[in-house]
Amino acid sequence: MPFNIPILLTWLRVALIPLVVGVFYLPEIGLNRYEQGIASTAVFIVAAATDWFDGFLARRWDQTSAFGAFLDPVADKLMVTGALLVLVHLDRVHPIFAFIIIGREIAISALREWMAQIGASKSVAVSSLGKIKTTAQMIAIPMLLFYGDLFGFIDTRVWGMVLLVIAAVLTVWSMLYYLRKAMPLIKKVQENK
């Protein structure tokens, strides 16, 4: 396993996930719900920033690796899943939205793994649609963790939910896009058996 600054940042993101979740469940820290929202939002934003920064540094310093390419999306999925589960528990997100987003991540991960096994991983590489979906959910989640008025005029409850609905729609759309790209290759493999 290679060890460098980009991979260290990815591991830091994994380590921050329990803080995003735990801040709502640790009675010893003595924070009220508003303070918990601020704390978890801050931790989530730091974790999300490491996602961009580790990729930037890996490319800039030519420190990309197969392990880093594996760990980075796993860290992202754990971070989003943990935050969505907290938001469902706090009744800030309907379970169907969490199921759509988490279910898609599992399905596409399995599809990517299978496509890699048949030597066609480039057919399900990350698309611009997937990046827009990720951006929408990475803005929506901290807004819903904060869950209040930001700067006195941005209602994060409303805008967070709007962005999460957009992310859920894009989640389904991008999953269909990936499946459509993969189907001809899947059929070809089945025919050659």
Image (tube, rainbow, N blue to C red):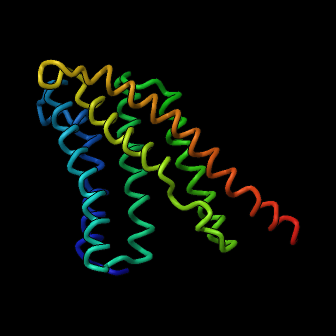
Q: Return the residue nearer the eye: 88 or 122.
A: 122
For residue 84, which quarter of the picture?
top left
Left or right: where does residue 39 sit relative to residue 78?
left
Left or right: where does residue 94 sit relative to residue 53?
right
Q: How many marks?
A: 0
Residue visible at 25% across and 61% down in the picture: 53
Q: Quadrant of the N terminus?
A: bottom left
Q: Position of residue 38 (x, y in %)?
A: 16, 33
Residue visible at 22% across and 37% down in the picture: 41
Q: Is residue 56 above or below residue 93?
A: below
Q: Quadrant of the C terminus?
A: bottom right
Left or right: where does residue 61 sit relative to residue 125?
left
Q: Is residue 127 above or below residue 92?
A: below
Residue visible at 41% across and 45% down in the picture: 134
Q: Position of residue 14 (x, y in %)?
A: 31, 57
Q: Is residue 135 above or below residue 168?
A: below
Left or right: where does residue 103 sit relative to residue 64?
right
Q: Position of residue 75 (x, y in %)?
A: 38, 57
For residue 186, which quarter of the picture?
bottom right
Q: Is residue 109 above or below residue 176?
A: below
Q: Position of residue 68 (x, y in %)?
A: 38, 71
For residue 34, which quarter of the picture?
top left
Residue visible at 14% across and 36% down in the picture: 28
Q: Return the residue nearer the eye: 147 or 137.
A: 137
